[in-house]
Amino acid sequence: MQDLLAFSGADLPAAPVRRAAKRVVDFAAALFLLVLLSPLLVVIAIAVRATSPGPAIFRQERIGRDFRPFTVWKFRTMSRSTATLRAGTALDAADPQITRLGHILRATSLDELPQLVNVLRGEMSLVGPRPLIEWEARACLARHALRFAVPPGITGLQQVEVRNSVDLDGRSDRDVEYVRRWSLWLDFAILLRTPARLFSSDGVYEEAASAANPVAAQNKEIA
């Protein structure tokens, strides 16, 4: 990982006070949401355990700000036997390894809720670029290194605009646009758009992108 950590385009194009304000907002909002949503989190965790064998939480290493690795938390949406072995492969809506409950969690993005813990720990933000696995992070270096100047987010510009309907370059274009335009007002606007996206299944799976690039599709992350 040392070659990744050598990247140093780390600071947001914004004043330190505004960066500190973003962290305060993230921490307070994540803590509030974890308390508010705790009954729902417990219900989902029980449902995951009850409907398929294995742990409720799926953990995977991702690359965050300054290319620093961290462990992301999500509700498990695949069968236990494949959740680890197939990390890094593309999925489509017909994939038999996705559980019935997993389809619902993915379609509504409820599988992302445990990432509120990542936000509390400072590894993620409520709003930011999507957290990538290592091979994707390396692939972004040539054109989209600026996306690693900020913490990754649970939601973000690409998540509300394109989701997985375009390839990695297309998604990363939105991430770089977010970094260049960043403000607390932009974060607020994205958060306002996020609930509507939660109830739309458009772009959840990379069907179009995978068909266009089957070689790359073999190495995609578990989204």
Image: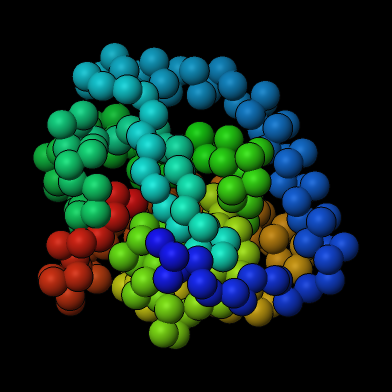
Question: How many labels sit on residues?
Answer: 0
Please tell me which residue is depicted at 72% across the width and 31% down the height of the picture: 32
Please identify the residue farthest to the front as the structure is shown.
2
Which one is nearer the viewer's eye here, 125 or 77?
A: 125
- The structure residue drawn at horizontal position 48% and vertical position 79%, both measured from the top left corner, is 144
Residue nearest the observer in this picture, 173 or 100 = 173
Which residue of the protein is positioned furthest toward the bottom in this rendering? 143
On screen, 96 above or below 67?
above
- Residue 110 placement (x, y as % from top left): 45, 37
The quadrant in which the N terminus is found is: bottom left
Confirm whether residue 161 shows in the render.
no
Q: Nearer the viewer, residue 30 or 189?
A: 30
Drawn side of residue 109 relative to residue 14, left or right: left
Q: Position of residue 197 (x, y in %)?
A: 49, 53
Which residue occupies the extreme right position in the image?
17
Question: In the displayed structure, does residue 78 sit left or right of residue 197?
Answer: left
Say which of 11 and 115 sits in front: 11
- The colouring scheme, among rainbow, by chain, secondary structure or one colour, is rainbow
In this picture, residue 204 sits left or right of residue 65: left
Q: Position of residue 105 (x, y in %)?
A: 37, 37
Q: Position of residue 98 (x, y in %)?
A: 21, 38
Asked if residue 36 shows in the view, the reply is yes
Tell me if residue 32 comes above or below residue 125 in the rendering. Answer: above
Residue visible at 65% across and 79% down?
180
Residue that appears at 63% across and 29% down: 34
